[in-house]
């Protein structure tokens, strides 16, 4: 980054915000940090070598071009709106907001102010997923027919949002990219085992106008960490498994063919392929993309319209889950 590159102030440097701050710092774009917890603010300020300031000071500082928001989801709207109205570009960690009307408001004011508004759907920037998307769009293995994802772990159990809102946005974003369309039917089920008011397991089924079907399973009460998305095409299963330990094994293509022998369908496996992809940290790519969009006046890959599309699916799934259908 050059001295004239956009400068970003990071709002929230806790569980995830500290990672955003680190990456903005590493690309030379971090101007300041903002955090209500004085200890977190001081740690981030000392570690990254930038001042800890108030949100009001950031809005009033003309040298700060953008605000990155990593706070509780229910606060995203108010912070993003105030930042845009102050003339700042805005990055918002997923989900964009919790209400479609709020999304429409942010989209409208960002467009009127000619400000970049980007949503943090991290895995859209993962080189392995980008390669997966290229393979499917090429049609090399025939049309996409079915896609499913697992995002499971025995990890941090949230108390402010259920597992659907916490885990599923990533997978919804990826599935919408793979299919190139929004679902016409959304059904869902969930179960609340730790806190009766917060689902810690969910499954979502999607049906698309093209005929493609999809499924998303999420849980934070699973014995092992599983993060994968599987695309079933006519001639191969293509798997992006981010939980795989080795970079070279995070993307796999499993070719197959189904022959009819004596009137009986017989599947024949091909040799598994591991497409080569250069290593890059997805979060750094995401942060750099935001800064680049500001500098060049481009729309982000995960802009507010994409964030709204994900939100529509989340709201439909939430409604279905609450009514067991």
Image (cartoon, helix red, strand yellow):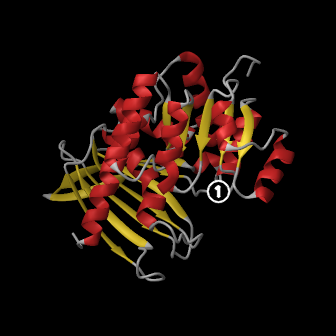
Give how far across and how far down residue 294 sits, in percent.
57, 23
Q: Quadrant of the N terminus?
A: top right
Q: Is residue 57 above or below residue 7?
A: below
Residue at numbered disc 1: 245
Identify which residue is drawn at 47% across, 56% down. 74
Identify which residue is drawn at 48% across, 39% down. 81
Q: Is residue 203 above or below residue 56?
A: below
Q: Quadrant of the C terminus?
A: bottom left
Give how far across and how far down residue 237 sits, in percent.
38, 50
Q: Nearer the viewer, residue 130 or 314?
A: 314
Q: Mark 1, residues whose alpha carbon is within 10 Å: few (<14), some, or many (≥20)? A: few
Residue 3 location, quadrant: top right
Residue 215 location, quadrant: bottom left
Let me know if residue 206 appears in the view.
yes
Q: Is residue 279 above or below residue 321?
A: above
Q: Nearer the viewer, residue 62 or 282?
A: 62
Left/right placement of residue 101 relative to residue 18 reads left
Identify which residue is drawn at 52% across, 38% down. 82
Q: Residue furthest left?
A: 263
Q: Is residue 165 above or below residue 129?
A: below
Q: Nearer the viewer, residue 247 or 206?
A: 206
Give the number of callouts: 1
Give how far across and how far down residue 180 sits, in percent.
31, 37
Identify which residue is drawn at 85% across, 39% down. 49
Give how far across and how far down residue 194 sits, in percent.
48, 82
């Amino acid at each position: 980054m050059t001295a004239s590159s956009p400068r970003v102030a990071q709002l929230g440097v806790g569980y995830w915000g500290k990672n955003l701050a680190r990456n903005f710092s590493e690309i030379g774009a971090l101007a300041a940090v903002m955090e209500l917890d004085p200890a977190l603010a001081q740690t981030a300020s000392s570690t990254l070598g930038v001042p800890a300031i108030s949100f009001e000071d950031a809005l009033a500082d003309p040298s700060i071009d953008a605000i990155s928001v990593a706070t509780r989801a229910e606060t995203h709207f108010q912070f993003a709106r105030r930042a845009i109205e102050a003339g700042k570009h805005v990055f918002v960690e997923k989900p964009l907001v919790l209400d479609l009307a709020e999304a429409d408001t942010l989209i409208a004011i960002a467009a009127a102010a000619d400000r970049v508004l980007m949503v943090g759907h991290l895995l859209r920037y993962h080189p392995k997923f980008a390669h997966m998307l290229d393979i499917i769009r090429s049609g090399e293995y025939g049309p996409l027919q079915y896609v499913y994802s697992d995002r499971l772990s025995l990890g941090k159990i949230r108390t402010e949002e259920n597992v659907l809102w916490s885990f599923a946005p990533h997978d919804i974003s990826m599935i919408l990219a793979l299919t190139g369309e929004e679902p016409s039917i959304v059904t869902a089920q969930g179960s609340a085992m730790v806190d009766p008011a917060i689902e810690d397991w969910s499954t979502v089924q999607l049906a698309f106008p093209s005929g493609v079907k999809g499924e998303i399973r999420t849980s934070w009460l699973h014995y092992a960490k599983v993060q994968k998305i599987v695309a079933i095409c006519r001639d191969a299963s293509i798997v992006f498994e981010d939980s795989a330990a080795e970079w070279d094994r995070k993307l796999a293509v499993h070719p197959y063919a189904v022959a009819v022998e004596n009137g009986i369908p017989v599947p024949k496996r091909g040799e598994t392929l591991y497409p080569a992809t250069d290593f890059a940290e997805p979060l750094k790519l995401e942060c750099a993309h935001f800064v680049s969009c500001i500098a060049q006046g481009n729309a982000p890959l995960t802009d507010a319209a994409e964030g709204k599309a994900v939100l529509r699916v989340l709201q439909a799934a939430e409604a279905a889950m609450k009514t067991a259908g």
